[in-house]
Amino acid sequence: MSLFWFDFLKDVVENHLITAKTSDYPKVAQKYSEELAGRSMLVHRTEAIAIECVARGYLSGSGWKEYKNSNFVCGIKLPANLEESEKLREPIFTPATKAESGHDENISESKMADLIGQELTFRLKELTLSIYQKAANYAMSKGIIIADTKLEFGLLDNKIILIDEVLTPDSSRFWAKSSYRVGASQPSFDKQYVRDYLETLTWDKQPPAPELPAEIVSATSQKYNDAYYLLTGLKLAN
């Protein structure tokens, strides 16, 4: 899915992708072609910017939890009386720090500027919202709502480029347009399905994580495949 989005977004921002064709990989990797095919890509090494750049178009997840307590999300005041999963009047930029372990921590835009500078903050915000808006408009035409997404950027020869994965079910919240309704948590194509299962367990959220049942793994895989097909019109090879 990242390959699809890297190509789709190439007129918005450059990315770190060199190739995903194992036949074009360095010789040292050729003997592992069978294992790498379909699950790897060769990319440029960059100086990663240690900020998670998050765009939110709908009120959900950690944003919803923060809003319920304060009417703010990452320092941004939102209108009163919004409901869970409600579409925002316009997408908002809500950065987070990248944690070495545990969960990332939401921060304000001003805190981000303190960490990496005002000019870089402004540019990353601009890019994040542009990417989100273009992708969200496209996905909506295919029956998927992108409620929010996390993006990562790096510097290559002092140029900002898009890195890591992009707009996948692991880094985004995908909802079916056909079943969307305001005021509740939404059925999703993303890893929220796994989170919801884990919430039914008496697990203290500390390692080691419990093993997932085969039916949860299978259902999650199917959700990812469904999202890929809706967005691209293609089916993933088994």
Image: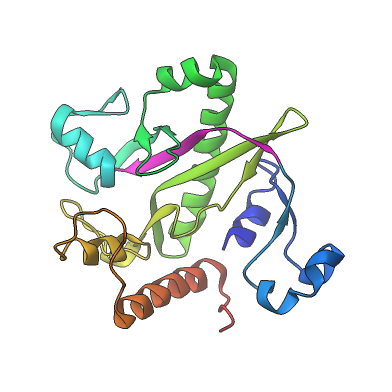
| Residue 60 in sight | no
Residue 97 on image: x %, y %: 43, 32
Q: Locate residue 73: give its quadrant.
A: top left
Q: Quadrant of the N terminus?
A: bottom right
Image height of 167 relative to 76, above or below: below
| Scheme of colours in the image | rainbow
* Residue furthest out toward the front: 208
Image height of 231 relative to 57, above or below: below
Q: Locate residue 218: give its quadrant.
A: bottom left
User: In the rendered structure, does residue 53 fall within the stretch colored magenta?
Assistant: yes
Residue 12 on image: x %, y %: 65, 41
Where does the magenta region start and end? Answer: 46-60
Residue at figure coordinates x 56%, y 74% from the top left: 233
Q: In this view, does 47 lie to the left or right of 51?
A: right
Q: Judge by depth and name the residue closer to the eye, 136 or 167.
A: 167
Q: Judge by depth and name the residue closer to the eye, 234 or 149.
A: 149
Number of marks in picture: 0
Residue 138 on image: x %, y %: 51, 55
Q: Considering the whole magenta stretch, tell me its main secondary structure.
A: strand
Residue at figure coordinates x 56%, y 30% from the top left: 124
Residue at figure coordinates x 74%, y 27% from the top left: 158
Residue 191 on image: x %, y %: 36, 62
Q: In this view, does 174 lie to the left or right of 157?
A: left
Q: Judge by depth and name the residue closer to the eye, 153 or 136.
A: 153
Residue at figure coordinates x 19%, y 28% from the top left: 71
Q: Judge by depth and name the residue closer to the eye, 77 or 22.
A: 22
Image height of 108 relative to 197, above or below: above
Q: Quadrant of the C terminus?
A: bottom right
User: In the rendered structure, does residue 219 fall within the stretch colored magenta?
Assistant: no
* Residue furthest out toward the right: 27
| Residue 149 in sight | yes
